[in-house]
Amino acid sequence: MNASELARVIESVGKDRGIKKEIIISALEQAVLMAAQKKYGPYAVLEAHYNNDSGEIDLFQFKKVVDSEPEMLDDAEEIPVEEALKLDPEAVIGDELGIKVEAPDFGRIDAQTAKQVIFQKVRDAEREIIFNEYIHRKGEIITGIARRIERGNLVIDLGKTDALLPRSEIIPSEQFRPGDRVQAYLSDVVLSARGPQLYLTRTSPKYLAKLFEVEVPEIREGIVEIKLCAREAGARSKIAVVSKDRDVDPVGACVGMKGIRVQNVIQELKGEKIDIIPWSDNPVIFVRSALSPAEISSVRLDERNKTMEIMVEDDQLSLAIGRKGQNVRLAAQLTGWRLDIISKSKLQKRTAEATFNLQHIEGVNETMAQGIYQAGYLNVRQIAEASIENLQKIPGYDNAENAVRLKEKAAAVVEKAGDILAVTAGGEDAKSTFTATPSQPKDAKALAEERLREMMRQADSSTDKTGEGSRK
């Protein structure tokens, strides 16, 4: 390959693959060095440099200037001072002198090795370009074409590279085929030995928030902000929004005229139900909104344990809890509070039972028992086992002496009655109460497995009923 051809190759590869000219030149220099090392020996000190003027790669061998007998001279590493002075009149003993030498002709094996070096350099450069391009797009929505399935995960063609959409990050009801257009959220970009690995998700709450950002101009402009988001992919989601402009309704902005904006998001998520609620820094107001459309009668707050006991009318209980506890579970995830939902009739029954139980303590009348119950204590044993510090938070027992006396009297009752007064009578009815904790939302895989188990239970139940009917 002559000089002009080499220059054209460098220019052509750089344009076609978007790789800097310096990287290609570095690969060529390294290939020449590998071939030259075989010709001049493993101990020869060599350097290769691309000459922009001539368009060639110049090869230099560095030798140490010595004053030595010819038979003691190491030709690969040393040069006599007499010869050095002919090349450089200012050379002195001990100098390292760079001597231009002839670049070796590439044999078949050398050419193959050179190709591998150049291709590897080009691949590494391409990988770095792709990584740098997509690392800045992390957290964005990207679109590609489904190509194939590897170990249950969907490989998405993005044009320049592939991305991986794990099975657990696909909405349970979705099925993709090769050639389908796929839109997803770029959750992570990792540079590995195999090159940049791009990971996508369609189940993350961040994907839902990003979809609203695309659909709602007020969110893009920073007027409306999505504060929190809770999601059970493919089933239901809740987002809390707030407006920085009092003239802009955050919920209305997200819903859009005739619901067009939220409908576009729902369509992309395959019919997933979305509740849009106003965010509030008041936890009680926020929880009331999060549990909508259920109407809340009253809320009892326990800031110490970050728990809320929420009372609803009996006809609102199923609405507050939601199908399989979904409504209250998402509300707990959204707000970060542990939510105990209880019906009015059950709460009244429990209040009466707790008040009656606590009156077994000597000196505690009905009014005092109600005060103790309001502080979170349901029975005598809880008082006996509580710390003095916590008992001092009960109205009327803020004095340490009174708290100690209450604890001693409760302990005496427990000692006599044993476990009889350890719990309120009747226990809790699963149909009248429900508790949800702000745990991490389940991923798509877990939800799919849960739905499968539920279907199997229903099938077993139907079989049992059929069997009973035939026996009758």
Image (spheres, rainbow, N blue to C red):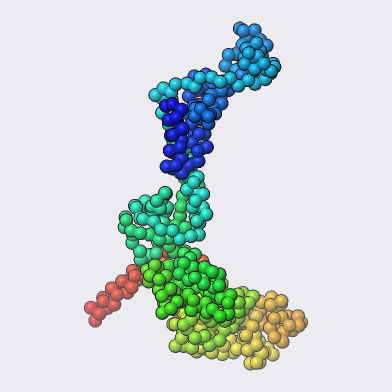
The x and y percentages for residue 159 are 39, 51
The x and y percentages for residue 296 are 52, 85
Note whether 25 is above or below 437 in the view shown: above
The x and y percentages for residue 142 are 44, 58
Residue occupying image coordinates x 52% and y 79%: 249
| Residue 168 in sight here | no
Figure quadrant of the C terminus: bottom left
Nearest the eye: 388 or 245: 245
- In this picture, residue 396 sits left or right of residue 423: right
Figure quadrant of the N terminus: top left
| Residue 267 in sight here | yes
Nearest the eye: 398 or 250: 250
Nearest the eye: 194 or 416: 194
Q: Residue furthest bottom?
A: 366
Note whether 48 is above or below 238 in the view shown: above
- In this picture, residue 345 sits left or right of residue 66: left
The x and y percentages for residue 264 are 40, 71
Residue occupying image coordinates x 51% and y 53%: 135
Residue occupying image coordinates x 44% and y 82%: 319
Note whether 13 is above or below 311 in the view shown: above
Note whether 426 is above or below 43 in the view shown: below
Residue occupying image coordinates x 68% and y 11%: 67
Nearest the eye: 311 or 244: 244
Query: In the rendered picture of this protein, how many numbered marks are placed on residues?
Result: 0
